[in-house]
Image (cartoon, rainbow, N blue to C red):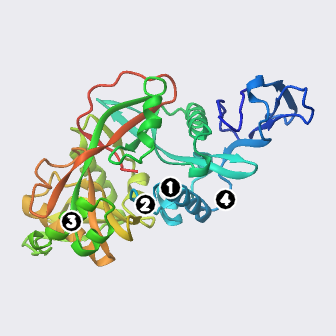
């Protein structure tokens, strides 16, 4: 049994269907405060709390899968992030369709990956993850990508994030997942993530490296008005005349078209060829790759043919992100172009950017992690944003040593 108080949740709990804690103090002044724990059997068990916890308000704490719809999950996560960061830091608006796509909510038992802390039967925090296969220096194993650690501002400081982290670790051990990978944004003083994860460094987490982004502005005026960082907004505004117009030249021998189901085996070959140089990378199977390429909805992808054969593939998604305004931003997830000619690479990349622009995106982002040809983004119109996101690896068991990670093929989530 673990102890929990409303001032500081100092317990570690598992994420099985219902693990509950009732925290409080009896009505008699002379009695010591007690906690009642209702486990799997439902039989109450009581244990005295230290006297320092006298006067604690009675609260029911449960760790269990999020019980709402994808729409309710989206509303909770966005509201939690905006309660802390609105107007101070950009906040993605992960909608219900995004969560259905990325978390694979149509799969059996997917709900167990939506780990939630409830206080008095109301969501108080969530963290979400989805299983993947990783390879580190030739060794393949099951892991997860995780993100969306969401605790509303009014509930911060109560240990909810630590409780969520412990619950996910238990679920990972049950599922045979070695570690989960996520990111902590350190580019703003208001970001709470780095402080939380650094406290766990060496206990359950490792921070092996930091990454940045390649950025291509697609609408300078709207991007300048949107950017929370006024210096970057000013640069977007004055740089407008320098942005080359996006065009497709339709060179002979190069054909660009939407991805089709029949392309997936070939795209898997391109993924293998294009990422084998990475120190840590995702390993795709046909089902996961088809979903990521948008063949099940939400995501999108174009392929490039040369000589009648698919030789390049780029997958992306477009998501609303709140800054000073709410605008659409395109995110390049998969860039498999190592077998394309230089002309073919330019044609495919520009075709993707034009589609993003047509959807209303103000900019495109690509994680600067080295899973693409070296000079692909060294071209007019793209700029390199400083490395401002920690790569965070959280282990199911105790942290293990990792080789130096210079190049990564992972999803930014």
Q: Earlier in the sequence, mark 2 or mark 1?
A: 1
Most foreground residue, 53 or 129: 53
Q: Is residue 78 above or below residue 136?
A: below
Which residue was labeled with disc 1?
81
Q: Is residue 196 above or below residue 374?
A: above
Local crowd size for mark 3, using a 10 Å CA cut-off: few (<14), some (14–19), many (≥20): some
Q: Earlier in the sequence, mark 4 or mark 1?
A: 4
Q: Residue at x 23, y 46 (%)?
A: 371
- Provide the secondary structure element on which disc 1 rests: helix
Local crowd size for mark 2, using a 10 Å CA cut-off: few (<14), some (14–19), many (≥20): some
In the shown orientation, is residue 340 left or right of residue 210? left
Q: Residue at x 44, y 42 (%)?
A: 193
Which residue was labeled with disc 3?
234
Which corner quadrant of the image does residue 381 belong to? Answer: bottom left
In the shown orientation, is residue 22 left or right of residue 343? right
Which residue was labeled with disc 2?
92
């Amino acid at each position: 049994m673990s102890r929990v108080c409303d001032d500081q949740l100092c317990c570690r709990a598992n994420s099985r269907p219902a693990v509950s804690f009732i925290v409080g103090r009896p009505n008699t002044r002379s009695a010591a405060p007690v906690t009642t724990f209702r486990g799997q059997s439902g039989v109450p068990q009581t244990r005295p709390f230290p006297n320092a916890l006298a006067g604690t308000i009675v609260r029911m704490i449960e760790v269990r899968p999020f019980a709402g719809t994808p729409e309710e999950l989206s509303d909770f996560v966005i509201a939690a992030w905006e309660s802390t960061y609105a107007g101070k830091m950009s906040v993605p608006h992960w909608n219900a369709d995004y969560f259905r796509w990325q978390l694979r909510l149509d799969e059996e038992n997917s709900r167990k990956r939506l780990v939630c802390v409830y206080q008095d039967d109301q969501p108080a925090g969530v963290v979400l993850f989805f299983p993947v296969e990783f390879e580190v220096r030739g060794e393949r194993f099951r892991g997860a990508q995780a993100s969306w650690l969401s605790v509303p501002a009014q509930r911060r400081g109560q240990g909810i994030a630590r409780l969520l982290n412990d619950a996910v670790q238990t679920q990972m051990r049950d599922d045979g997942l070695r570690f989960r990978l996520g990111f902590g944004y350190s580019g703003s003083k208001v970001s709470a993530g780095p402080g939380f994860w650094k406290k766990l460094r060496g206990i359950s987490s490792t921070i092996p490296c930091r990454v940045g982004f390649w950025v291509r502005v697609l609408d300078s005026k709207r991007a300048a008005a949107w950017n929370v960082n006024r210096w970057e907004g000013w640069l977007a505004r004055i740089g407008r005349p320098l942005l080359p117009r996006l065009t497709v030249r339709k060179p002979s021998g190069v054909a660009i078209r939407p991805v089709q189901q029949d392309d997936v085996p070939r795209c898997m070959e391109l993924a293998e060829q294009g990422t084998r140089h990475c120190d840590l990378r995702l390993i795709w199977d046909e089902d996961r790759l088809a979903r990521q390429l948008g063949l099940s909805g939400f995501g999108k992808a174009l392929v490039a043919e040369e000589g009648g054969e698919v030789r390049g593939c780029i997958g992306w998604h477009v998501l609303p992100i709140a800054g000073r305004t709410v605008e659409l931003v395109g995110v390049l997830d998969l860039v498999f172009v190592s077998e394309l000619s230089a002309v073919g690479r330019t044609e495919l990349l520009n075709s993707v950017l034009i589609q993003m622009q047509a959807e209303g995106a103000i900019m495109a982002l690509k994680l600067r992690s080295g899973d693409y040809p070296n000079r692909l983004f060294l071209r007019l119109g793209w700029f390199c944003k400083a490395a401002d996101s920690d790569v965070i690896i959280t282990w199911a068991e105790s942290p293990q040593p990792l080789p130096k990670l210079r190049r990564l093929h992972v999803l930014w989530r």
